[in-house]
């Protein structure tokens, strides 16, 4: 069914008890043309674009838990594209372009809100590095502007810009086109739109093996519900990507770390935008429900536990209270962790693998929510054409052998 | 926060005294000039990133300031054991 003001009104008369299921829970078939492993935003989106743009509808998305139960449902939803390098500008801006029309395209409100992302500079080094980003962004047609401390305060009144602050604010970079979106809606919206085009959505079904034939090419996946055949497999498993790649006999340049976030009790609108402070590892915005949504830095060690240590979020909150003294008396309601897959250059790996028929989208680390529609579109393209799109061609696995890194790690130290 | 037993200090200490130093038992190549690009990539970038028992290095930064190795389960975060530098790689029991 098509969601509209009229459907909302009609369903109001039946007390909202007669909405149809958004998508059916599929029983796995014997085989598919394409299997996508991982029912996060990236994987579900890839299935949608395979069906929508490439006419490949005999597709299954296989998810070990529930849709969006991975990082899609755990992230702080910051969307921006003001990264340093040309390759990054292209891939992240491609995603922001798609975010723009997404709600209309999939008939599902993902609540993309271009409220602006303000990145604070606390030191001369920050100022120089942000201005370098701003110039590089301008050359690439990506919006990003420098604000003085006073201008930043005018844009975001809760900021403490006093000179004797623990983390003095020397200025900020503002990407006006950046903002947030509702994470669950992204997973559900893509799932519903993909299912409507014939894609099977299979939940509670972990992939336990990847089967390869005598010629080395993939033949399908072993799962908790038996073997499912496919000549093409796209893996989009975020924190568990190394585990999936090992099933196909591949070793990857990835490490998985815990990353935490937390929300406060809901309050009236007070934060007009997203504020990020890379050098103190704190990120904050306010959800439409009124909660402050706060993101921390990663824990230091490799872990799949989906939980992090208290001292990490304590440090983040200490910084938040310094930058926004008015939040000091707020209570935090919930905190949680996700597992983020980090590459040595903090740029993703999106393309073909040495195994014929196996495609991968991973390494988005702490910052892949913003890329969801873009990564999904490019993964679908790569699978359908059996070759990467020019935008994701530089994001190959071979760059770690050839040395052509896309070193956003060195450029930003932390990337969200 | 993890409690970590430093094999030199022989004490369980809070994690904030330590810094994690990556996967253990990756030896720097002795013959750098002879290495192929693939071998360099393996040494520099490829990691086992194991889900389960993981060999890793820690530094007791705010203690004895010495590096040591550990075997830790990356699903439960529980340390199986920690051992001194130079001791053989801990065996993973099946
Ligand atoms: C606390 C936190 C804050 C973040 N903040 C931001 C932010 O502000 N902005 C931003 O851009 N990014 C952010 N990120 C990063 C972002 O969430 C991820 O990069 C992105 O969601 C990855 O997208 P995905 O949809 O592919 O991942 P996921 O939603 O994790 O999807 C992967 C799916 O694969 C499934 N899977 C794994 N193994 C198997 C298996 N064997 N069989 C079947 N299924 C399997 C998992 O269950 C999971 O559902 C944050 C992450 C965290 C944890
Ligand atoms: Zn010690």
Image (cartoon, rainbow, N blue to C red):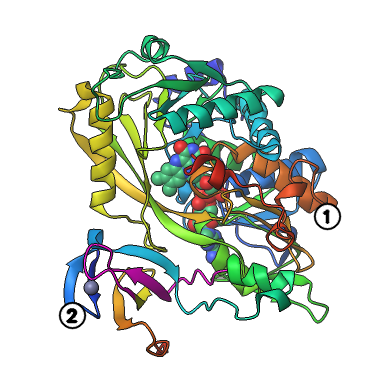
> On screen, A143 above or below A86?
above
CA distance for labels 1 and 2: 55 Å
Near mark 2 (Cα within 10 A), the count class, few <14, some 14-19 or many ≥20, is few
Magenta residues?
Answer: B45-67
Image x and y of residue A86, in percent: 70, 36
- Mark 1, other Cα within 10 Å: few <14 / some 14–19 / many ≥20: some
Residue A382 x %, y %: 78, 50
The residue shown at (49%, 20%) is A116
Which of the two residues, A289 or B4, is positioned nearer the viewer here?
A: B4
- Residue A290 screen position, x and y as percent: 31, 24
At 61% from the left and 28% from the top, the residue drawn is A99
Does residue B53 show up? no
Under tag 2, what secondary structure?
loop
Q: Is residue A387 left or right of residue A141?
A: right
Residue A386: mark in rendering: 1
Name the residue: 59% across, 43% down.
A191
Q: Is residue B93 above or below residue A32?
A: below
Q: Is mark 1 within 8 Å of ligand 1?
A: no
Task: State the quadrant of the N terminus of chain A.
Answer: top right
Q: Compare residues A260 and A229 and report the one nearer the observer.
A: A260
> For residue A320, what is the image quadrant?
top left
Which residue in the protein does label 2 denote? B10
Q: Residue at x 15, y 27 (%)?
A: A329
Which mark, residue A31? none
Q: Mark 1 against mark 2, which lies toward the viewer?
A: 2
């Amino acid at each position: 069914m098509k969601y509209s003001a009229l459907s909302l009104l009609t369903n109001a008369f039946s007390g909202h008890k007669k909405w149809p299921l958004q998508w059916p829970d599929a029983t796995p078939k014997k085989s598919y043309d394409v299997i996508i492993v991982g029912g996060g935003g990236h994987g579900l989106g890839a299935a949608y674009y395979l069906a929508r743009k490439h006419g490949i509808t005999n597709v299954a998305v296989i998810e070990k838990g529930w849709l969006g139960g991975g990082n899609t449902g755990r992230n702080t939803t910051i969307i921006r594209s003001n990264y340093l390098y040309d390759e990054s500008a292209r891939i992240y801006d491609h995603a922001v372009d798609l975010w723009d029309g997404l709600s209309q395209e999939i008939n599902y409100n993902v609540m993309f809100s271009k409220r602006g992302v303000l990145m604070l500079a606390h030191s001369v080094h920050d100022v120089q590095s942000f201005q370098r980003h701003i110039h590089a962004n301008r050359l690439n047609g990506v919006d990003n502007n420098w604000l003085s401390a006073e201008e930043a305060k005018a844009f975001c009144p809760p900021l403490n810009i006093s000179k004797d602050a623990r983390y003095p604010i020397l200025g900020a970079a503002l990407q006006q086109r950046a903002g947030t979106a509702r994470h669950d809606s992204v997973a559900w919206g893509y799932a519903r739109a993909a299912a409507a085009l014939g894609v099977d959505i299979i939940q509670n079904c972990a992939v336990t093996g990847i089967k390869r034939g005598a010629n080395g090419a993939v033949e399908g996946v072993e799962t908790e519900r038996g073997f499912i055949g496919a000549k093409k497999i796209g893996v989009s498993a975020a924190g568990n990507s190394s585990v999936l790649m090992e099933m196909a006999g591949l070793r990857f340049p990835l490490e998985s770390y815990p990353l935490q976030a937390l929300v406060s009790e809901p309050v009236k609108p007070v934060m007009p935008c997203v504020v990020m402070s890379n050098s103190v590892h704190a990120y904050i915005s306010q959800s439409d429900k009124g909660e402050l949504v706060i993101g921390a830095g990663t824990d230091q060690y490799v872990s799949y536990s989906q939980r992090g240590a208290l001292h990490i979020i304590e440090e983040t909150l200490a910084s938040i209270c310094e930058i926004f003294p008015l939040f000091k008396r707020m209570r935090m309601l919930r905190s949680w962790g996700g597992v983020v897959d980090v590459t040595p250059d903090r740029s993703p790996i999106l393309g073909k693998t040495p195994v014929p028929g196996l495609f991968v989208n991973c390494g988005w680390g702490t910052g892949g929510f913003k890329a969801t529609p873009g990564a999904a579109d490019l993964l679908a393209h790569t699978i359908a054409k059996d070759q990467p799109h020019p935008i994701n061609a530089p994001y190959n696995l071979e760059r770690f052998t050839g040395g052509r890194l896309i070193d956003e790690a060195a450029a930003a130290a932390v990337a969200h | 926060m993890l409690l970590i037993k430093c094999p030199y200090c022989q004490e369980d200490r809070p994690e904030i005294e330590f810094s994690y130093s990556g996967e253990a038992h990756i030896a720097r190549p002795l013959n750098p000039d002879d290495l192929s690009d693939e071998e360099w990539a393996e040494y520099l970038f490829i990691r086992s990133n194991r889900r389960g028992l993981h060999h890793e290095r820690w530094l007791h930064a705010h203690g004895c300031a010495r590096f040591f190795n550990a075997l830790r389960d990356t699903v439960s975060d529980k340390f199986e054991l920690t051992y001194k530098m130079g001791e053989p790689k801990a065996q993973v029991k099946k």
